[in-house]
Each structure stands twice: as C-alpha cells, then as structure tokens.
C-alpha cells in the first residue's frame, strides 16, 4: 500500500472526527469507518508504537484484523465469575446498536486461580483503531467511548492516536537462534508419574481423561519479534487461527491454533471435537497410511468421541437442535494431523456468549472429563500456571462472535520464550509416547525459532 494512500485515509478519518465535534453523540459508543486499500496487516501492526496491539486471523482466511490502543479495557482477576462477566458485557453491548463494534480478548484456561501479569483471568479490549480485512475488502475504523469520557476530549484522544499511526514497514527477516538453555515443567520423570496417576484404574474409572500439558522455557540472549514469528507460523499452518495479544512491550502471547471453540452467527453455532493426534508422513502414501491408522486407533477414537459427547451434552440445554458428525475425519497441519468432528447447534433465544463460554470452555480436548475432577488434578499437580494457554481467545459483538482454543501457543518475554503443548491421557496412554506427542506439537514453532 502506498504511504500517501494510508495518509490520505487517516486524514479523512480525522476530518470526520472534527466534524463529529459539532454534533452531540448519537450513542455512548460510536464507531467511524471508511474503506481503504490493501494493507499488510501484520507488518503494519508490528510497526506501531501504541499498545495494546492485537491481531486476529480467522481459520477460514476470509477475515483478518490488526488493532491498536484501547478506548475501553475490561480486565478481571481471580474471583470474577462468568455471570459477572456476562453482566459487564451486556451493559457495554447496550451502549451501541452498531453491529460492527467488537471486543477482542481472551479468557484464561482456569479462571479460579491467578493468571499471567497484564493478561488477567479475562481481558477484553474495544480498540481505538482497527484495520479489518474481509475477503479482499479493507476497512479503517476508529472507536469512541462517550459513555465514560467527555465528548470533545474523547475525540481529541482519537485524533492523537490517528496522528501517531506509523506507516507499515517490512517485518524483520526470520533469524534462527541458539537457545542458551531449556527447562520443562513438568520434566520427564514428573510427567511419567502424572501419566501413571491418571491411568491408574481406580482414578481412571472416575476421571477417564485428563489433558496434561507442559511448559517448555527457552532462555535467549537476543530480542524476538513476536509478529515475525507469528507471520512465519501463519505461513507454515495457514488453515489455523492466528492471533496475538501484546498489552505492553514486555509480553506477547501468540498462537497458531487449529481448534475452534465456537463461532456464533446470531442463533446459529458451529463448534467441533478436535482430539486424537498423529504425525504427518514423509510421502503421500505414508501420510495416508498414518491418517488411516489414526482413524482406526481405538485410544484416539475414544478420546475424540468423549469430546464430541461432552460438547453435545453441554449444548443440548442451550439449544433447540444439536447435530454432530458421527464419523471422524482428518484435519491436517504441517507436522501433525488430528481427528475432527463438526458440531452445529441452533441456540435458544436469549442465549448469550458467556453462557456458551461457560458451557464449552475448557473443552475436554484441553481439560479432561469430568471437567471438575480433571481440572482439580491439573490445578494441583501440573506444576505451572497455564494462563491463557488452552484458554479461549477471540471476539464478541452484538450479532456474532468467534473464539479459538489457544493451543499451539507461545508467551514471549524479555530473555525467554515460553512454549506450551498438551496431550490427552486416557486408559492405555503411555508416558513416552505422550511425551513424544508434545515434541511433535512443538516441532513447527521450534523449527521457526531455533537452529536444531
């Protein structure tokens, strides 16, 4: 995109804001928008100096968003329940009739314990400035919060934010580094103990599945550009969700996740059971053979069926209709492939997004079954705080919402890269094989970052 074209569009937006000063606001939350020309959104985002910086790219590749700044910031810590979150969101949603206004953010895996600094157990942002792509059409948007701010001063803040927008620069070129050190939490010996505890017959009878995970921390001595890493990841796994949240220069959470938690379009809901994993083959014949073996593998089939049944059971009280694939199909990624079953529901009138979050998150694909006992086991024994890993990330708006499950993710901090991977443990699981599954799931991000 030519720099002068962006400058002209930003100037047009400022002119609209100046005109808006002359009239009283029509609603407490107002959004101005205009069509703009094509923009490399992740490069533009990486060039900005305003925080937060938020990126969202849908799995269907139709939609992409880059957003900066905040005119409304909801951040909740331990002790806030879903009902309080729903009330806060419903109150905010009532401040505008504009169906394009969106709140981007995430919910931690376990909302009963303390989460990461800056991220909170739940945090959602109404950005100040957004670039959105829908198909081949690009829009430039600015949001205004007159509910909490003086009319003229809020417009002045928006103008200042637009004037501070930087032109897009090329992303820094990919550069592989040598890590100074690595640590795993839990380490392999502890992992073996945990797997043995889960598959022990008496425990397994009451809790047939626990998804154990591992934090792999890699020490580095040079800065890592999270947006360059995410762009490379996006190139490796284009059929995944890609998203990132950077609330300050210190920490960035990025994810290239294959898993949809749910997508809602008014009363129509789409979700899925994604569980059961194997590697990709080195040839087409080997790839097909591995996929067929996965489809026929009893352990993985049972794991996927458990997830499917749980989701259907949780959605049934909220829906007029729930339908789910009887047979699993294969969902392929760069280094691995999963069992997948699509699920669709027609929601009852009045069902809101927080009821859906409460019903579906965390799914058995990242927590286990039954949810309560599996989460207790994880909380007490896994040995680290998952934070937003395996949480739910996405956006709300009045008529639609979409959330991904934040697997295949990384938290990048000064001097450290935190990588996360999990594996579903059921009767018959073997600790060595499950540990190798964690390595397989990290293969793509490790190949981007490090000389191996």
Image (spheres, rainbow, N blue to C red):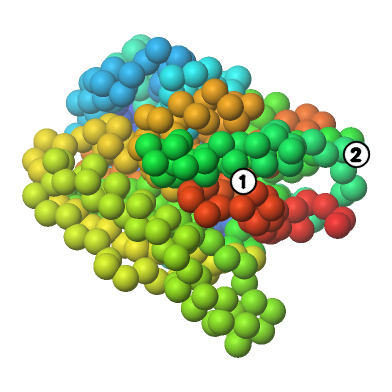
Please name whichever residue, 381 or 10, is drawn nearer the observer in this view of the structure: 381
The percent position of residue 282, horizontal first and vertical second, equals 69, 79
The percent position of residue 210, horizontal first and vertical second, equals 48, 41
- Residue extending farthest front: 202
Query: How many numbered marks are there?
Result: 2
Please name whichever residue, 25 or 279, is drawn nearer the observer in this view of the structure: 279
Identify which residue is drawn at 16% across, 37% down: 351
The percent position of residue 436, horizontal first and vertical second, equals 69, 55
Is disc 2 placed on a helix, strand or loop? loop
Identify which residue is drawn at 37% across, 69% down: 328
Q: Is residue 316 left or right of residue 182?
A: left
Please name whichever residue, 277 or 109, is drawn nearer the observer in this view of the structure: 277
The answer to which quarter of the image holds residue 75 is top left
Tell me if residue 444 can be seen: yes
Quarter of the C terminus within the rendering: bottom right
Categorize mark 1 by other alpha carbons within 10 Å: few (<14), some (14-19), many (20+): many
Q: Which mark is residue 421?
A: 1
Q: Could you tell which of marks 1 and 2 lies nearer the N-terminus? A: 2
**Which tag is nearer the camera, tag 1 or tag 2?**
1
Is disc 1 placed on a helix, strand or loop? strand
User: Circle 2 is placed at which residue position?
Assistant: 180
State how far apart marks 1 and 2 are (Cα).
21 Å
- Residue extending farthest bottom: 285
């Amino acid at each position: 995109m030519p720099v002068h074209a962006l400058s002209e569009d930003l100037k047009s937006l400022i002119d609209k804001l100046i005109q808006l000063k002359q009239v009283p606001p029509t609603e407490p939350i107002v959004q101005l928008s205009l069509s703009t020309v094509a923009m490399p959104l992740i490069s533009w985002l990486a060039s900005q100096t305003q925080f937060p910086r938020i990126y969202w790219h849908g799995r269907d590749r139709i939609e992409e968003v880059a957003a900066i700044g905040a005119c409304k910031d909801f951040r909740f810590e331990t002790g806030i329940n879903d009902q309080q979150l729903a009330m806060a969101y419903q109150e905010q949603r009532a401040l505008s009739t504009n169906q394009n206004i969106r709140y981007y953010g995430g919910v931690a895996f376990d909302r009963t314990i303390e989460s990461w600094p800056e991220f909170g157990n739940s945090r959602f942002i109404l950005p100040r400035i957004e670039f959105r792509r829908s198909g081949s059409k690009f829009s430039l948007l600015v949001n205004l919060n007159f509910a909490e701010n003086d009319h003229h001063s809020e417009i002045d803040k928006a103008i200042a934010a637009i004037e501070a927008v930087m032109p897009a620069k090329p992303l820094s070129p990919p550069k592989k580094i040598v890590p100074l050190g690595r640590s795993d939490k839990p380490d392999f010996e502890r992992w073996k103990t945990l797997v043995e505890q889960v598959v022990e017959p008496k425990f397994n009878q009451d809790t047939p599945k626990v998804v154990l995970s591992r934090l792999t921390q890699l020490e580095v001595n040079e800065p890592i550009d999270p947006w360059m890493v995410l762009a490379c990841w996006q190139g490796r796994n284009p059929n995944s969700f890609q998203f990132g949240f950077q609330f300050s220069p210190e920490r960035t959470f990025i994810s290239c996740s294959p898993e949809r938690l749910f997508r809602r379009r008014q009363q129509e809901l789409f979700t899925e059971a994604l569980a059961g994993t194997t590697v990709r083959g080195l040839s087409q014949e080997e790839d097909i053979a591995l996929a067929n073996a996965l489809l026929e593998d009893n352990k993985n089939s049972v794991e996927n069926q458990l997830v499917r049944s749980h989701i259907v059971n949780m959605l049934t009280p909220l829906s007029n209709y729930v339908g789910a694939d009887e047979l699993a199909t294969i969902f392929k990624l760069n280094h691995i492939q999963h069992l997948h079953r699509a699920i669709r529901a027609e929601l009852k009138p009045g069902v809101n997004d927080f009821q859906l979050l409460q019903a579906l998150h965390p799914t058995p694909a990242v927590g286990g079954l039954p949810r309560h006992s599996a989460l207790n086991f994880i909380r007490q024994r896994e040995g680290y705080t998952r934070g937003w890993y395996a949480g739910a990330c996405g956006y709300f708006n009045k008529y639609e919402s979409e959330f991904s499950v934040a697997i295949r993710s990384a938290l990048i901090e000064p001097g450290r890269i935190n990588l996360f991977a999990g594996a579903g443990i059921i009767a018959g699981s073997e600790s060595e094989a499950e540990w190798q599954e964690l390595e397989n799931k990290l293969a793509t991000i490790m190949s981007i970052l490090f000389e191996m």
